Image (tube, rainbow, N blue to C red):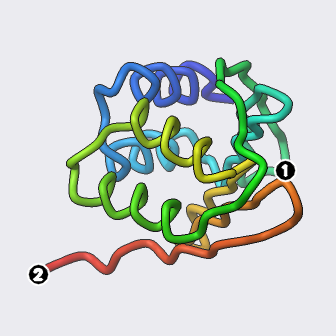
Amino acid sequence: MKTELMQRALRQSEAGELRFPEVIGILREADVESYQVDFLRGDDTFYLLDGRTHTEPIEVGEVAAEFLRESVVDAIRGAQADRIRYPEFVRRILDAGVASYRVHLTGKRAVYVGRKGEMHVEEFPKPSN
C-alpha cells in the first residue's frame, strides 16, 4: 500500500499546494479507486483498487445545517478555475452544509452529501484540447 502518496496528496491539499488534477494524479499512482472525506467523523478514507482501505484523520470546522446546492457548485467552480485552493474550498462547502463527499477516480465524478441526505453529483470536467 502506497500510504506515503495518499498522505502526501492529503497534506499538500490541506496546505493549498495542489490543484485537484494534481491530487488525482498522485492518488492514481497510489492505486486509489475512490476516497471519502467525512467532515462529521473527521477522516479521509482511501479505497484502493485491490479492495483495501486506508484512513487518515483530518481537521475540520462545523458543518452547516442546511445544504445549499448553489454554494456547493460555486465552490467547485472556484476550485476548477484555480481561483480557490483546498483550504478555502473546504470552508465554503462546510458553510454550504456538506457533511461528506466521495470522489470516484474511476467513475470520474464526485458526490457531495448534506446532513439530511441531500446530494450533488459533479462529473469531472472534460479535458480541454
Please give the residue where the numbered disc 1 appears in the rendered image: 51
* Residue 43 visible in the current orientation: yes
Relative vertical location of residue 71 with respect to residue 37 in this rendering, above or below = below
Residue 92 in picture, x, y percent from top left: 49, 44
Q: Is residue 19 left or right of 94 when viewed as pictured?
A: left
Tell me the quarter of the picture where residue 112 sits: bottom right
Q: Are marks 2 and 1 in contact (CB under 8 Å)?
A: no
Please identify the quadrant where the C terminus is shown: bottom left
Please give the residue where the numbered disc 2 appears in the rendered image: 129
Q: Is residue 25 left or right of 51 when viewed as pictured?
A: left
Type of amino acid at the residue the image marks with label 1: Gly
Task: Say whether disc 2 or disc 1 marks the residue closer to the N-terminus.
Answer: 1
Relative vertical location of residue 51 with respect to residue 67 in this rendering, above or below = above
Q: Which residue shows up at 64% across the image and 73% down it?
A: 120
Type of amino acid at the residue the image marks with label 2: Asn
Q: Residues within 10 Å of mark 1 (few under 14, many from 20)?
A: few
Q: Nearer the viewer, residue 66 or 117?
A: 66
